[in-house]
Amino acid sequence: MTDPTARAEKLSRELDSAFRNRADLYRLFLDELTAELGAERAEAVMIRTIEQRGKEVAAAAFAD
């Protein structure tokens, strides 16, 4: 694919799809955790997990 506009549109669709997929995974994880642990504990687990991933990404982004 050599047309820059077509390539940008394709990449935009792929990025949108990746975001939607991630949201679906979060929803499914939360549903399962809620069924097993209850809403309050499930939310706490999700928050800790997402925050931990954010710390990992930040550490990698700002590493020397």
Image (cartoon, rainbow, N blue to C red):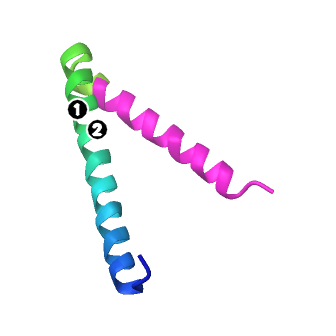
Residue 12, above or below 5: above
Badge 2 vs badge 1, beta-carbon distance below 8 Å: yes
List the residue tagged with mark 2.
25
List the residue tagged with mark 1.
28
What residue is drawn where x is 45% and y is 34%? 49
Query: Is 60 in the magenta?
Result: yes
Residue 58, above or below 42: below
Three-letter code for the amino acid on which mark 2 is drawn = Leu
Residue 42 horizontal/vertical position (percent): 29, 26
Dividing the picture into quarters, in which one does residue 17 lie? bottom left
Residue 46, above or below 7: above
Magenta range is: 42-64
Q: Quick one: quadrant of the N terminus?
A: bottom left
The Cα atoms of the two marked residues, 2 and 1, are separated by 5 Å
Judging from the image, what secondary structure is the residue with disc 2 in?
Answer: helix
Query: Is 56 in the magenta?
Result: yes
Residue 27 horizontal/vertical position (percent): 22, 38
Q: Residue lying farthest right?
A: 64
Q: Which mark is residue 45?
A: none
